[in-house]
Image: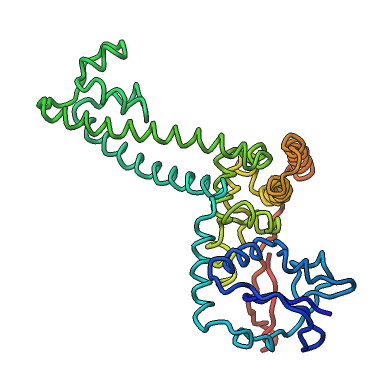
Amino acid sequence: MILVTKWFGVFLCEGQIVKRSVIFEKDAKSIAKRLAAIQKGEILPEERSLAVKRMKVAEPRLAKLGKPVLFDSSFIRPQDYQMPPDLMQRVMVELGKIRTREPLSEDKCVAQAIRATDDLIETINLMSERLHEWYGLYFPELADYAREERYAELVAKGGSREDILRSLEVDLESVGSEMLEDDIDVIRSFASSLFDLYQRKADLDKYIQESMQKVAPNMTALLSANLAARMVSLGGGLGRLARLPSSTLQLLGAEKALFLHLKTGKNPPKHGIIFQHPMVNKAPYWQRGKVARTLGGKISIAVKVDFFKGEFMGDKLVADMEARVKEIREKYPNPPRRAQPQFQRQQRRPDKGKVYKSKHN
């Protein structure tokens, strides 16, 4: 006996003969709900009702009811059970509605938040460069006393040189050009917009930190919240990331370099986005590949524990990582010797008119 589930019902077959069956009611919404449950890996009540001892099943999802085997069920056709021709189309539409209305997992929101942070950083850098160049015509010395967010805040709240110098408690004579009050007001408004962007970025960073502590505490302990969130974003979610091998996690974010290696034969990349980790980017070049490989393995463990809701082991992963990096530094303290290229050239012997090859270092 083989248990088979089609979109319109459940069938218990012996060979190509249907012994028993449960046909779903001809309602698109109710069928769509059952199909949504099947896509989540659940076992339907109709499937349990037809289960018998020592039977086989046609899909791995039903492995608890019997042994999964390959089975051609094309002989079970919907028209043989009086199913309307357009019912399947309506079922698929309802199924799409059900799946799109499902609540988003937290890792999806974190992935969007880290992308929004990248957009904000790009915008902030452009606006900050413009503000420094614009306000620098009027007060170039301010760049020596304030940077980034503080610079924008001083210009937005002060505006004039005198007000900013009072707030900084600095006495100096500026070499900048004079500006009209209307021009300064426009610059202040621009600086205020930039300062608001800095505040939005700080709020997003706080949200990412708190969310990653809930979603992936082990990855956060190992990598930091922002780097872990970037890996979740690049990997397409925590679930997909948990199914990737450690070698893929090591190179995640270096796809262009990898394809260039496959296409042209250039040296393959040793790391992807994990280069942002201090242990990787501070390692000497001859140790960096080994450190990246070790970190990829630890990330693989961390993401699997986080996805399957295991116990927190971030501290142990960090300690193991530090011990391995220390071992790499002690074992490979010096860069490897590079082989000297050997060139071959043709020489002619003066005594004989034969050509032979000689090697020179």
x 26%, y 15%: residue = 165
Q: Looking at the image, which is closer to me, 132 or 94?
A: 94
x 27%, y 30%: residue = 192
Quadrant in the picture for the N terminus: bottom right
In the figure, 51 relative to 225: above or below?
below
Q: Looking at the image, which is closer to me, 44 or 326?
A: 44
x 84%, y 70%: residue = 66
In the figure, 62 relative to 313: above or below?
below
x 71%, y 64%: residue = 44
In the figure, 72 relative to 95: above or below?
below
Percent coordinates x, y for residue 119 in the rendering: 40, 46
On screen, residue 120 versus residue 96, left or right, reads left
Q: Looking at the image, which is closer to me, 76 or 147?
A: 76
Quadrant for residue 312, please give it. Answer: top right
Percent coordinates x, y for residue 257 in the rendering: 55, 62
In the figure, 323 relative to 82: above or below?
above
Percent coordinates x, y for residue 52 in the rendering: 85, 72
